[in-house]
Image (spheres, rainbow, N blue to C red):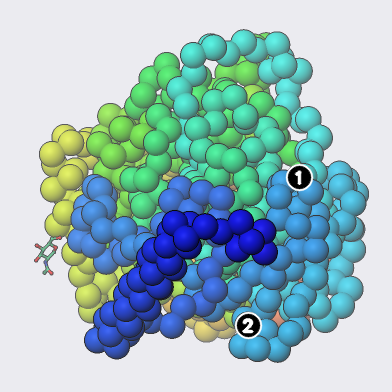
């Protein structure tokens, strides 16, 4: 070595000193390592799965222990758990991990079973960017599609083939394109709660928001309501970490829709909250019209027109304007098209319409107003009726609601198979909370049409103490006010004793029947086994109308010799064609205009007359008008399932 050959005695001494120092340093290191090990023996470290480093871990993902009682009050949360990874490991994609655009089309996920050691990684490759009209048209093609339908309630196999970045055709009214919006609109946080959502539908929602609302969008806040599906664990964390402006929050407890949104709201920083379901696609320019309306009046709660994505084909279907949100006496929400609001004036096409209720799909609300008006009812479980609770509350406690036509967002319809509907009782309990908190004496009308709720209520009472306190402290108006000022179109049943209930036929032992559900426009009455659920409830009112259906919007009518239902007229007095007289003594139900009696005919029953008429189908059975006799098939009772004083 050159060093040695040139070394002088002085230099050699220096070298020795260096060597000594080096040895000392090594000794110190060894010692400290020993000490470390000592400590780790006293307090063993938990085994750790290898952790990926995210680009911004502190921002990305927090786990909230929502057992904190503070959550119940909808205020702030104290303890944030630190980042944890569980069950699943991410398999880095072959394309590398750098830029998001490169990664969008392909990812690999270890399925839950695979995480336990098998190497069966699933590779999913995104299809070509499709358009809405490029979706597949037909039925279920494979077992895979049936399984997906069972799992999600929609055809996830078709969804997987459609680009996460597809754009919807622009179906806005041409007048909307000329609208100007303020430059200083408030910022928005889009809060998307999800529970076991499919990958494709969830991410399509997020990309859709990001690509349609860049300007006033503060953030997209994904809130995981304790999903179990593997792809929503670390694969989602990783995917989200690549997207600017998207945060992911995970709850450690199942919160349900209302609780999950309340949690998201508490963590959001935008001035306006936009709650959005996790399977939506936004139309270009959807956010500005909503923000404008909220900015003008902070107590205004607004919704876009909700277009529909078909659960099987993923085809996009625009909703006819005008439309508004309503609910019926079974407390079921539905969108109602309101042709009576249609107007020649093109200006009407861009004007918002007041809405008695708004659906839960997409709703925008000022963040402070949301908190002060009571967030969501924390006593509600899982899902159902929370949007009705919010609607009545917002209106009654000083706010208003409207649908904004220049904003359109499409919502994936779900196919509800009977066996995927396990939460009926929870839904009823949520409705009971709405009825007892907000409907005053009118709640009896609800219980008569939903006897399951009535029986649940007999054995348990909801604790609505906090909500009643809120109602009082906000000085909210009563339900009578709501009905007369906000929703006068809702028919208020009279439900008189022995003139309302199931229409029971003595001769057949069955009840007058008609398919239940919103949006039905009428048709022939049937005769069917009595349901006992309230679905066959009808009401003979003092006008002589027999009102049918949970909205009471269908009237007993006649078409030739057949008894049918048709839309009730909105004007008074009622035409004599729709008037009926019930003779209690004989049990006869007499049609005023013709003075004929209603007769029950079972399926396959014989018809003496009228069998040649085009409306009569002798094998179908139903209700027919006949010369009055005292035969049992012309005898009827109104059977009250819930006593008039009940509930
Ligand atoms: C679109 O909606 C209309 C009614 O709003 C309906 O009649 C039509 O069948 C729907 N089309 C598809 C493809 O779902
Ligand atoms: C109802 O809830 C309130 C607070 O939310 C509580 O103070 C009260 O004890 C509860 N009542 C019953 C009967 O559980």
The residue nearer to you, when weighing 502 against 461, is 461
Circle 1 SS class: helix
Q: Is residue 286 found left or right of 496 in the rendered image?
A: right
Task: Give coordinates of residue 249: x percent, y percent.
Answer: 45, 55
Q: Is residue 377 found left or right of 321 in the rendered image?
A: left
User: Of the numbered discs in the image, which one, if any, rests on residue 101?
Assistant: 1
Q: Is residue 240 visible?
A: yes
Residue topped by disc 2: 115
Residue drawn at 66 percent across, 53 percent down: 203
Task: Give coordinates of residue 196: x percent, y percent.
Answer: 57, 68
Circle 2 SS class: helix
Q: Is residue 383 visible?
A: no
The residue nearer to you, when weighing 233 against 392, is 233
Q: Earlier in the sequence, mark 1 or mark 2?
A: 1
Mark 1 crowd level (few <14, some 14–19, many ≥20, 10 Å Cα):
few
**Residue 601 picture quarter:** bottom right
Residue drawn at 59 percent across, 24 percent down: 215
For the N terminus, give its image quadrant. bottom right
């Amino acid at each position: 070595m050159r060093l040695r050959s040139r070394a002088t005695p002085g230099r050699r001494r220096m070298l020795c000193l260096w060597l000594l120092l080096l040895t000392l340093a090594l000794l110190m290191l060894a010692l400290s390592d020993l000490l470390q090990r000592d400590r780790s023996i006293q307090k063993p470290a938990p085994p750790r799965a290898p952790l990926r480093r995210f680009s911004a871990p502190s921002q990305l993902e927090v786990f909230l222990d929502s057992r904190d009682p503070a959550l119940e009050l909808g205020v702030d949360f104290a303890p944030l758990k630190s980042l944890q990874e569980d069950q699943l490991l991410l398999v880095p994609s072959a394309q590398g991990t750098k830029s998001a655009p490169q990664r969008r089309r392909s990812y690999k996920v270890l399925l839950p079973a695979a995480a336990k050691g098998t190497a069966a990684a699933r590779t999913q490759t995104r299809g070509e960017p499709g358009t809405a009209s490029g979706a597949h048209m037909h039925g279920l093609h494979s077992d895979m599609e049936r399984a997906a339908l069972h799992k999600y309630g929609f055809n996830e196999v078709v969804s997987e083939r459609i680009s996460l970045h597809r754009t919807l055709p622009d179906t806005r009214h041409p007048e909307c394109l000329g609208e100007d919006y303020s430059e200083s609109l408030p910022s928005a946080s889009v809060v998307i709660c999800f529970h076991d959502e499919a990958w494709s539908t969830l991410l399509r929602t997020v990309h859709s928001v990001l690509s349609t609302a860049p300007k006033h969008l503060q953030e997209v806040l994904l809130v995981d309501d304790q999903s179990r599906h593997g792809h929503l664990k670390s694969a989602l964390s990783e995917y989200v970490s690549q997207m600017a402006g998207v945060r992911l929050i995970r709850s450690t407890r199942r919160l349900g829709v209302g609780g999950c949104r309340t949690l998201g709201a508490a963590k959001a920083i935008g001035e306006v909250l936009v709650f959005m379901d996790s399977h939506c696609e936004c139309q270009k320019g959807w956010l500005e019209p909503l923000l404008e309306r909220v900015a003008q009046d902070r107590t205004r709660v607004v919704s876009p027109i909700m277009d529909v994505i078909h659960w099987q084909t993923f085809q996009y279907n625009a909703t006819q304007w005008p439309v508004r949100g309503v609910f019926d006496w079974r407390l079921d929400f539905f969108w109602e098209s309101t042709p009576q609001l249609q107007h020649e004036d093109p200006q009407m096409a861009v004007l918002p319409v007041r809405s008695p209720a708004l659906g839960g799909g997409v709703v925008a609300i000022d963040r402070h107003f949301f908190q002060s008006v009571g967030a969501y009812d924390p006593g509600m479980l899982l899902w159902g009726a929370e949007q009705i609770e919010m609607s009545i509350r917002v209106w009654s406690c000083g706010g208003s609601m409207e649908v904004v036509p220049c904003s359109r967002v499409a919502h994936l319809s779900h196919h509800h198979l009977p066996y995927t509907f396990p939460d009926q009782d929870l839904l009823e309990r949520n409705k009971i909370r709405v009825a007892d908190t907000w409907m005053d004496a009118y709640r009896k009308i609800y219980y008569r049409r939903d006897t399951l709720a009535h029986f649940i209520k007999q054995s348990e009472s909801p604790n609505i103490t906090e909500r009643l306190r809120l109602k009082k402290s906000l000085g909210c108006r009563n339900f009578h006010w709501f009905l007369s000022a906000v929703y006068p179109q809702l028919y208020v049943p009279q439900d008189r004793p022995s003139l309302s209930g199931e229409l029971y036929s003595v001769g057949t032992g069955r009840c007058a029947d008609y398919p239940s559900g919103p949006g039905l426009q009428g048709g022939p009455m049937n005769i069917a086994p009595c349901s006992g659920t309230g679905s066959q409830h009808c009401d003979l009112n003092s006008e002589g109308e027999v009102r049918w259906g949970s909205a009471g919007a269908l009237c007993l009518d006649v078409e030739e010799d057949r008894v049918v239902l048709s839309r009730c007229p909105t004007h008074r007095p009622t035409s004599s064609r729709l008037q009926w007289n019930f003779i209690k003594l004989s049990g006869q139900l007499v049609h005023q205009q013709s003075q004929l009696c209603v007769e029950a005919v079972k399926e396959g029953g014989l018809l003496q007359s009228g069998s040649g008429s085009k409306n009569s189908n002798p094998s179908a059975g139903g209700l027919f008008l006949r010369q009055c006799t005292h035969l049992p098939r012309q005898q009827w009772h109104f059977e009250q399932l819930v006593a008039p004083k009940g509930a």
